[in-house]
Structure formats: structure tokens, C-alpha cells
Amino acid sequence: MRRCLDLAIESARQGGYPYAAIVTLNGRTVVESKNRVSQDGDVTRHAEVAAICEAQKRLASTSLDDCTLYANVEPCALCAYAIREARISRVVFGLSSPVMGGFSRWNILGDHGLSQAMPEVFAPPPKVVPNVLPSEADSALRRGSPILWAFARSRGLFRCERALERLEAPEVRRQRRPRIPEKAMRLLRRRVFDRFGRGGAR
């Protein structure tokens, strides 16, 4: 996470937005990415999406099972959906985002409905570890981009808190799990279902 915070500061100093993401596999860094929106003139080039794109190339797979994504700020809805479709297993972030967050606002990262309706495409929700080093993340955002930090704080866009607890809804607990065990479903996703529309199995 501290490396992610350093990257976010670098991004701001290079004229970009102060956001960064890192993808790891088995504790080793696969890719580091900064927000590329201003540099590329493309609103979809969020740090998380850019990191996912590069990680898929480096690992030669559209499926990032067993990977962890670190972000200095909670992934937005766009990034959260990309995380789910890439099947990332764990998401760690610093500041929560009650206005735009794909976990605390929209709960895409915790939505069991995706994997229950389409287990062939979506893995179960990733483990989410929110509010890791939140004070340091807030400080890094302030150092990297004091104007954006002041704007975000005045609008309540980010929250610096020690813990974010999410209670699972009773209707989610009552739903049945997929009949196929997750290990078998993971194999089916990669070997069978990924041949259609995801660039072929690798």
C-alpha cells in the first residue's frame, strides 16, 4: 500500500490525477499503474483499469484469479466492475469513497448476484480489505494534489476512517450457492467459457 501511495504522488507530480493501483500475485508485483486519464485523454484510463489491462497482458490471461489489487482510493463503479469481470480475488484500498465507491456506495465488489446468476463469467466476490493506512493515504493525496484534496474533502468524496464494516444482507445469506464447487467452476471458466468473447483460452 505504501508503494501505491508513492505512485499516486508521482502521478500528480507528473501532471496526472493522484491515483495509483498495483496488481500482485502470490505476494509479487505483476504491474504498477498510475491514473492515465489526463495523459491519454481517455476517461476510462483509471489506474485500476490500466493495471488490470497490463496484468492480463503480462500473465497472458483475461482471468486474474488469485491476484490482489491495491489502490490508494476505493475503486469506483467502473473499476469495480472491471475487477469483478477480471476475477481478481482480493482488493485492498486506503480511502473509502462514499459518493463514487464500487464497494461502500454501489457494492459491486460485494455483490453475490453477479456470480450466482452467471457463475460461468463471474467468480464469487473478492475479499475486500478497506481502509488500509487511511491517514497515510489521506496525507499522500494532500501532498500530491492539495487542490484536489481540498475539493474532495469539501464535497465529502473520500472518507478517512479506520474501519469500514459491511453487514451482509439477509437475502444474500439465504441465497443458494452455485451447485458446482468453486475450484471446478474456475477451471470451466478458463478452459471452456473464456473461449467465447474473451480472446480465447490461454
Image: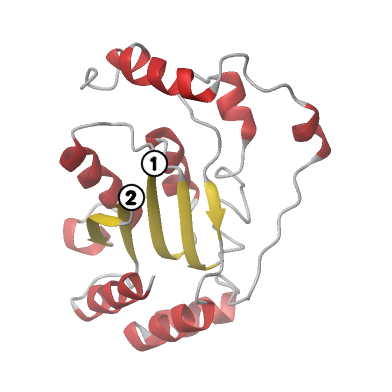
Q: How many marks?
A: 2
Nearer to me, 143 or 148: 143
Q: Which mark is residue 26?
A: 2
**Quadrant for the C terminus in the image:** top left
- x%, y% of residue 46? 32, 55
Residue lying at 45% horizontally and 78% vertically, measured from the top left: 137
Crowd class of label 1 (few under 14; some 14 to 19; many from 20; radius 10 Å):
few
Asked if residue 178 lies left or right of residue 199, the reply is right
Tell whether label 2 touches label 1 (CB within 8 Å). yes
**Quadrant for the N terminus in the image:** bottom left
User: Which element type, helix, strand or loop, lies under badge 1?
Assistant: loop
Q: Which mark is residue 34?
A: none
As displayed, is residue 24 above or below residue 142? Answer: above
- The residue under label 1 is which amino acid type? Asp
User: Which element type, helix, strand or loop, lies under badge 2?
Assistant: loop
Residue 12 in which image quadrant: bottom left
Of mark 1 and mark 2, the one earlier in the sequence is: 2
Asked if residue 5 lies left or right of residue 102, the reply is left
Residue lying at 63% horizontally and 29% vertically, measured from the top left: 113
- x%, y% of residue 150? 48, 85
- The residue under label 2 is which amino acid type? Asn
Alpha carbon of mark 1 to alpha carbon of mark 2: how far? 7 Å
Camera-side mark, 1 or 2: 2
Q: Which residue is mark 1?
A: 66
As displayed, is residue 138 above or below residue 76? Answer: below
Instruction: Residue 62: tell me if it is visible.
Output: yes
As displayed, is residue 126 above or below residue 153? Answer: above
